[in-house]
Image: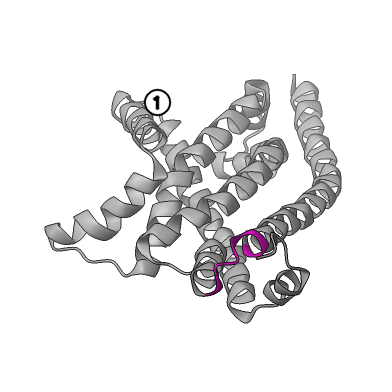
């Protein structure tokens, strides 16, 4: 038996089950990360409220999901929670599990990005009569968003790799599709090489997209700084 077979490699490269698993991995990464961004941002805003209760909730939430393995969380949702009378399908358990696991990392990114915006800009905007919602939308969020883009981009790559863990609860994504194929023909080396290439390809494409988005976002940041400078100028004129 040959160690490497090129014909098997090229066959696996266009194997329908692997391509379907690849597509599932890509859309699943995007959906769960977007949900985690929404939830993580909400958690970060709650944690920013000046209250012992909200701060304790934020710290407990982040500590719990960062301290427990994603694999344990997935199995708990799919196998243990049904004993409490709540049943999730494979897809539901996988989405909820990856969303919850990723949300505390997003919350920390959002919290640190918002904290990086100088407090003086809040004070200047309030002094000229701007509402809190307007301050957040026009001044704070654009600057915080630019700061958050690089770490959020890294979270996409991490979430992409995390999707392979949902195979343990029988969801068919790229890794499980590859594993199923190897169990039928026992050509593990070629199949896993194909899976590795696809993971690398998706990561490379995402990196190019992220770099382009960061360059484009630099213009948005310049506009946000211009609005901030305008607020400071108005404040100076009033004084």
> Residue 168 lies in what quarter of the image?
bottom left
Residue situated in front as seen by the camera: 171 or 207:
171
Residue situated in front as seen by the camera: 79 or 116:
79
Residue situated in front as seen by the camera: 177 or 28:
177
For the C terminus, the quadrant is top right
Q: How many numbered discs?
A: 1
Percent x, y of residue 60: 32, 30
Residue visible at 43% across and 58% down in the picture: 166
Taking the view exactly as shown, the residue that stands out farthest to the bottom is 16
For the N terminus, the quadrant is bottom right
- Residue that label 1 marks: 50
- In the drawing, does residue 211 fall left or right of residue 118? right
Q: Give above or below for 34 relative to 18.
A: above
Residue visible at 57% across and 65% down in the picture: 174
Taking the view exactly as shown, the residue that stands out farthest to the top is 239
Percent x, y of residue 138: 69, 44
Residue visible at 31% across and 27% down in the picture: 56
> Residue 42 lies in what quarter of the image?
top left
Q: Callout 1: 10 Å neighbours few (<14), some, many (20+)?
A: few
Percent x, y of residue 76: 27, 51
Considering the whole magenta stretch, tell me its main secondary structure. helix
Question: Is 157 in the magenta?
Answer: no
Q: Secondary structure at mark 1?
A: loop
Percent x, y of residue 9: 72, 69
- In the drawing, does residue 86 fall left or right of residue 143? left
Residue situated in front as seen by the camera: 52 or 184:
184
Q: Give above or below for 101 relative to 55.
A: below
Q: Where are the magenta residues, as a range? A: 185-191
Residue visible at 52% across and 50% down in the picture: 162
């Amino acid at each position: 038996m040959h160690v490497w077979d090129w014909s098997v490699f090229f066959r696996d490269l266009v194997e329908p089950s692997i391509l379907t698993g690849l597509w599932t991995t890509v859309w699943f990464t995007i959906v769960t990360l977007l949900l985690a961004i929404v939830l993580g941002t909400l958690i970060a805003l709650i944690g920013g409220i000046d209250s012992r209760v909200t701060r304790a909730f934020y710290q407990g939430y982040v500590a719990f999901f960062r301290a427990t393995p994603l694999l344990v969380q997935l199995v708990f949702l799919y196998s243990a929670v049904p004993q409490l009378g709540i049943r999730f399908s494979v897809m539901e358990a996988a989405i909820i599990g990856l969303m919850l696991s990723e949300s505390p990392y997003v919350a920390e990114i959002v919290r640190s990005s918002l904290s990086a915006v100088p407090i003086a800009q809040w004070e200047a905007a309030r002094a000229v009569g701007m509402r809190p919602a307007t301050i957040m939308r026009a001044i704070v969020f654009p600057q915080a968003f630019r700061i958050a883009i690089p770490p959020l981009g890294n979270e996409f790559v991490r979430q992409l790799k995390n999707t392979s863990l949902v195979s343990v609860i029988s969801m068919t994504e790229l890794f499980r599709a590859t594993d199923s194929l190897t169990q039928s023909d026992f050509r593990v080396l070629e199949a896993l090489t194909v899976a590795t290439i696809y993971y690398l390809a998706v990561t490379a494409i995402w990196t190019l997209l992220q770099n382009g988005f960061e360059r484009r976002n630099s213009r948005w940041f310049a506009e946000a700084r211009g609005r901030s400078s305008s607020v400071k100028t108005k404040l100076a004129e009033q004084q």
